[in-house]
Image (cartoon, rainbow, N blue to C red):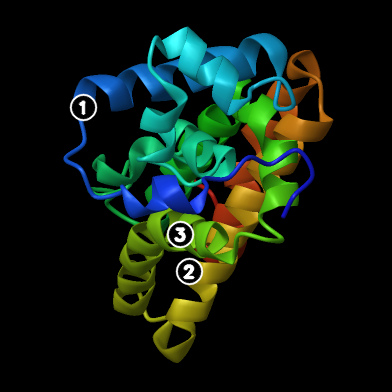
Amino acid sequence: MTSGEETTDPAIERRRGRPRNPAIDGAALAAARELLAEVGWDQTTMVAIAERAGVGKPALYRRWPSKTHLVFEAIFGWVDDATPVADAADPAEWIRRSCAYSLELFGRPEVKAALPGLLAAFRDREDLLTTLWTDFGGPGIGMLADTLARDGTGDGAALDAQATMLFIVGGAMMLRLLIADEDAAGLASRMPGILTGGVAGPPPAD
């Protein structure tokens, strides 16, 4: 278990399965995002989230077995949204859109505050790490692989698509964690061109 992590107890676990109230879910997820941006990972506890949301702590544990799971859903709750690259016309457009979305996502205050704690917690929560890669990267990777295959990449399309997503997600995450916002714009603007030059052919002339 990660240091400082809170998890449900067996008695609460046995009561799991009640219908979820969307109002409680929404209040708790919003409270988690607010607290992360205001006080950071360590002080965003289940108690603090419950108090901010105006719900009981047991209600949170009926929905999420730990703070890690709640925060994960709060900041990566895009899994039901349409992927931002769904209608990209070609690999270059896919890369530009994916870069823009990833840079925006990892630049959100609540995401930047949560990432160090989540990255540490992922060591003990392989289920969440798998979910992050599958839900965040899976649909887009499949679309890019199909596009690359049509463009003649052949058997390497799937691997090229996965590698491209790794570059985008890893680059966006590290840029937001390591580089001050005022210094990030120039680097962010270079990312799509470097990737399109390597994967989707040379970038178009200005």
At 41% from the left edge and 64% from the top edge, which residue is drawn? 141
Circle 3 sits on which residue?
A: 131
At 33% from the left edge and 60% from the top edge, which residue is drawn? 139
Find residue 62 and name its label.
none
Using a 10 Å C-alpha cutoff, classify the residue at mark 1 as few (fewer than 14 neighbours), some (14 to 19) or many (20 or more).
few
Find residue 161 and name its label.
2
Q: Is residue 144 left or right of residue 199?
A: left
Which residue appears farthest toward the front when viewing the image?
Answer: 11
- Of badges 3 and 1, nearer the viewer stands 1
Cα separation between marks 3 and 1: 22 Å
- Of badges 2 and 1, nearer the viewer stands 1
At 63% from the left edge and 40% from the top edge, which residue is drawn? 6
Q: Is residue 97 left or right of residue 184?
A: left
Q: Quadrant of residue 25?
A: top left
Find residue 22 and name its label.
1
| Spot occupied by residue 39 in the image (x, y as percentages of width and height) | 70, 12
At 54% from the left edge and 49% from the top edge, which residue is drawn? 203
| Spot occupied by residue 43 in the image (x, y as percentages of width and height) | 71, 20
Badge 3 or badge 1: first in the primary sequence: 1
| Spot occupied by residue 196 in the image (x, y as percentages of width and height) | 54, 54
| Cβ atoms under marks 2 and 1 closer than 8 Å | no
Which of the two residues, 117 or 19, is positioned nearer the viewer here?
Answer: 19
